[in-house]
Amino acid sequence: MLFQSAPTIPSRIVRWRNGLGLILLATLGPAFLVGASSVQIDANFPGGNIVVERMEGDTVFLHQDLRETAGDWFYWCFRVRGAAGRTLQFQFTKSPVIGARGPAHSRDGGRTWQWLGTNIVTGQSFTHHFPADATEDFFSLAMPYTERNWRIFLARVGASPALAVETLCQSPHGRDVELARLGQIHRPPAHRVALTARHHACEMMMNYALEGIIEAVLAEDETGRWLREHVEFLIVPFMDKDGVEEGLQGKNRLPHDPNRDYQGMPHYPSVKTLKQRLPAWSERKLRFALDLHCPYIRGAGSERIHFVGSPYPVQWARARRLCDLLARGQTGPLPYYPEDNIPYGKSWNTVAEPKMFGRWAAGLPGVDFATTIELPYATVRGVEVNAATARAFGHDLARAMREYLLTRPTR
Ligand SMILES: [Zn+2]
C-alpha cells in the first residue's frame, strides 16, 4: 500500500475552464488537478507540497506551497498519475525551486529517489517522459524522508538491544514525535550525545546521514562496539513532525520557527519536552549536541558541508576538534573541509540570543559543545548527495565522534 495517512490540512477546491474548454479541478493546499487528459497531480500524501495553477496542452504550471511560512522558501513534492506515454513539462511560476541536480524522482512511492539531472531542466521548468508502464511518479526538490522512511529504516536494521524507539511527545496534530535511544542504554554510559533533525521540516537529506550514524553505532566493527559500550545517544529524527508529514517548508514556519523556539516559553510540544528531557537525561555526561540541518537551495556556500560556528570560543574550539577528526578520517564520498564551516559572526551566523537548539544546548551544565551541522540537498563540492552518500557521511561522523570521545581531555 502506498502512503497510509492523509494530511490533516483541509483542501480548498478550485474549478476553472482552460483554453480548450476543459473543466479543471484543483485543491489548494494539497493540490489536485484533473483534466480531460486524465493527468492527476496531487500532494495528498506525507511530505506532499504543491499548488497546481493550470495545465495548457502538455505544460503544467505550478509552484511551491508556502502555507504556514513567513516569506519565501523552495520545498515542493508532488505525485503524477495518469500520464503514461506522455511527455509533460512542469513549469514553476514563483521563485527558483530546482536544485543543483534537477528534480529528484521516485517510482516506488517515495521509498527510493534518483536525481533526474539538469539536462531536462530549462529555467524553472523540467520535462519528463512518462513510459508506457508509468503508474505513479513522485517529483521533489530533493529526496523526502517522512515517518514512513524511518519505519522502513527501522525494519531494515531490525531489533537490537542497543536501540529503543520511544515517543518524546505528541505533536499538536496528534502524531507521535519519535525519540530513539541508542548505544549503551542498559548501564550508565561514560558519555552521552544528543542528535536532533528536522527543526526545519523540509531539510530531509540529513535524515539519511542520521541513518548512517545509527547503522555505524549498531555495526559489528570497532567503531560500533566502542560506541555501544561507552555512549548513549538520544535522537529525535523529526522535531517538527507535523511539518514533515504535512509537507510544510518548516523554515520560517508560522506562527514560529521551531528552531527559534528555545528562548522563553516554547510554542512546540517537542521543543518544550526536549527542554525538560535533555537536562534531566544528561547527568553532566552530555558531551555534545548536534542539530542536523540542510542549508539554502543553491550557491557555493550552500553546496558545502559545514558546521555553524558557536559564539562561545571554548566550545567552538572543542567542536573544531571534532571537525578536524572528521576531515582527517573521512572514507565516504562527500568531502568535508573545516574551512567550509561558517564561524560565528560570518554570513548569516550572527544571532546572539539562545533561540536555536544549538545555542540553548550549549548552556547545559558540563556540555563540551553544541552546534549545528548542515548537509547540502544535492551537491557537496561537486559530489552527488543521495541516500547512499549521505549515509556514508553519517558513518564518517560516527567514527569522528568515537575519536573525539576517546581522546577527550578529562575536565
Ligand atoms: Zn535548518
Image: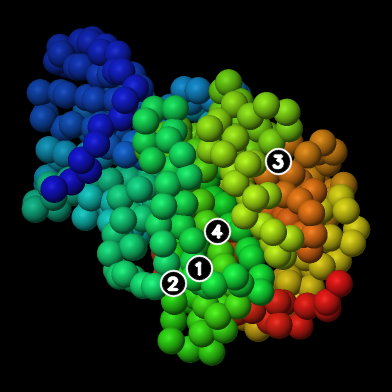
Which residue is found at the position 88% from the left and 53% from the top? Answer: 312
Type of the residue with mark 3: Met
Mark before the other along the chain sequence, 4 or 1 = 1
Mark before the other along the chain sequence, 3 or 1 = 1
Mark before the other along the chain sequence, 2 or 1 = 2
Which residue is found at the position 56% from the left and 23% from the top? Answer: 254
The residue under label 1 is 185
Marks 3/2: CA–CA distance: 30 Å
Q: Which element carries disc 2, helix, strand or loop? A: loop
Does the CB distance between marks 2 and 1 fall below 8 Å?
yes
Marks 4/3: CA–CA distance: 18 Å
Instruction: Judge: label 1 CB < 8 Å from ligand 1.
Output: no
Mark before the other along the chain sequence, 4 or 3 = 4
* Marking on residue 356: 3
Mark before the other along the chain sequence, 3 or 2 = 2
The residue under label 2 is 162
